Image (tube, rainbow, N blue to C red):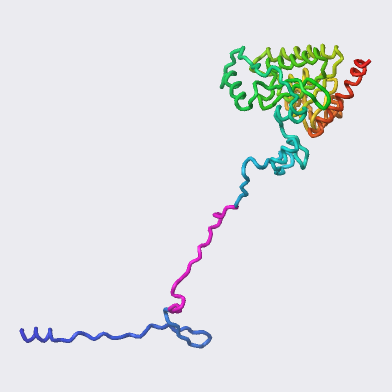
Amino acid sequence: MQEQRVKIRSNPLPMLVKTATTSFTKKTLGLETSEPAVTPPPAANLTASFVKKSKLGSAKSKKREIPEGLWTKCPKCSTMVFDKELDENLKVCTHCQYHFPIGARERIHSLVETCTFEELDPEVTSVDVLHFTGVASYTHKLEEYQRTTGLKDAVITGICKIGEHRAALGVMDFSFLGGSMGSVVGEKLTRLIERATEKGLPLVIISTSGGARMYEGMFSLMQMAKTCGALAYHAKARLPYISVLTHPTTAGVMASYASVGDLIIAEPGAMIGFAGPRVIKDTTQRELPPGFQTAEFLLDHGLIDAIVSRKDMKQQLTDYLSYMTAGRKSTAAA
């Protein structure tokens, strides 16, 4: 047993046999070619480089970022207008002549001679007589609009000089509660008309309004009769009154002092009327003609006397006042 164990231990380990690399034979048209199973890459290209491809839909088109406060897009022709150029052109588009809204003080500055405007009743403000309740109180709304616009109400009145003529001027501002006519607007305009009648001055009122102010109810509607009554005394004194209609002039304002001028002129494209087009269409059950309630439509139908561009407004008002006051001056001279 011991000898047998020794023999088993003394048996040599089996020898490792080196096998050749396996090759495959590819037959093509009777020709035999051998190809190695694995083809190693060239030594020069051992370091692989990968190019990152953008995924479909991941690339976003870059939008041109335009700084705020430098350019304004015209709502009519969609042209980007440089703000400085727009201001120099009195907020009139240089491409299509669209008239942008303009504030009351800007308009006064464009019409009157330098340092000749004497404002009347600047501190008069509205009172919440009806104690109007809703989402926000009327008093809160007044305070908010006074803070954002810098105005006490929707109209500025005063005595000024337009060209060589001393005149009474009232200018409404649509940015204050839509230029609505409340008790303050009616009172300030009435005082302006009475001052013009007392001093023998021609009167110019530039209107832009959405109508009577709903927060004051009947007190707003009373201003229609009050202003027209004052204008009747002004006309009795044979003093001229020029009414200028801008976009928009509607409802109670258009139904009262804005439509009783001796001369009624308007800016191009201004919306002028009493009720809105939708209300008129639903009431009459008829299709409205093209351009209905625009200044051009009203000129064709005889409701207004002329359409004057904002850039020409000062010169035209000067010429109109010269013509309308010529007889009074000659009478005074005689």
Q: Is residue 179 visible?
A: yes
Q: Where residue 160 sits in the image (x, y, percent)?
A: 77, 23
Residue 301 visible in this rendered orientation of the protein: no
Displayed quadrant of residue 224? top right
Q: Nearer the viewer, residue 78 or 168?
A: 168
Q: Give the residue at x 82% y 11%.
A: 233
Left-right relation of 13 to 292? left
Judge from the rendering whether residue 74 lies leftward or rightward of residue 135; answer left or right.
right
Front residue of 291 and 151: 151
Residue furthest out toward the left: 2
Which part of the image, by quadrant, shows the C terminus? top right
Tell me the residue at 68%/12% (across/down): 219
Magenta stretch in the rendered image: 39-61
Number of labels in the image equals 0
Residue 282, position as x, y percentages in the image:
74, 25
User: Which image quadrant for residue 210?
Assistant: top right
Which of the image's four quarters has the N terminus?
bottom left
Most extreme residue toward the right is 334
Q: Main secondary structure of the magenta part?
A: loop
Q: Residue at x 81, y 30 (%)?
A: 314
Across and down, in percent, residue 281 comes to 76, 26
Magenta-drawn stretch contains 54? yes
Q: Is residue 104 left or right of residue 42?
A: right
Compared across the picture, whether 123 is left or right of 232 comes to: left
Residue at 75% over, 12% down: 226
Name the one closer to the observer, 259 or 67.
67
Quick check: is 117 in the magenta stretch? Answer: no
Q: Nearer the viewer, residue 214 or 239?
A: 239
Q: x and y percent of residue 326 in the render?
A: 90, 21
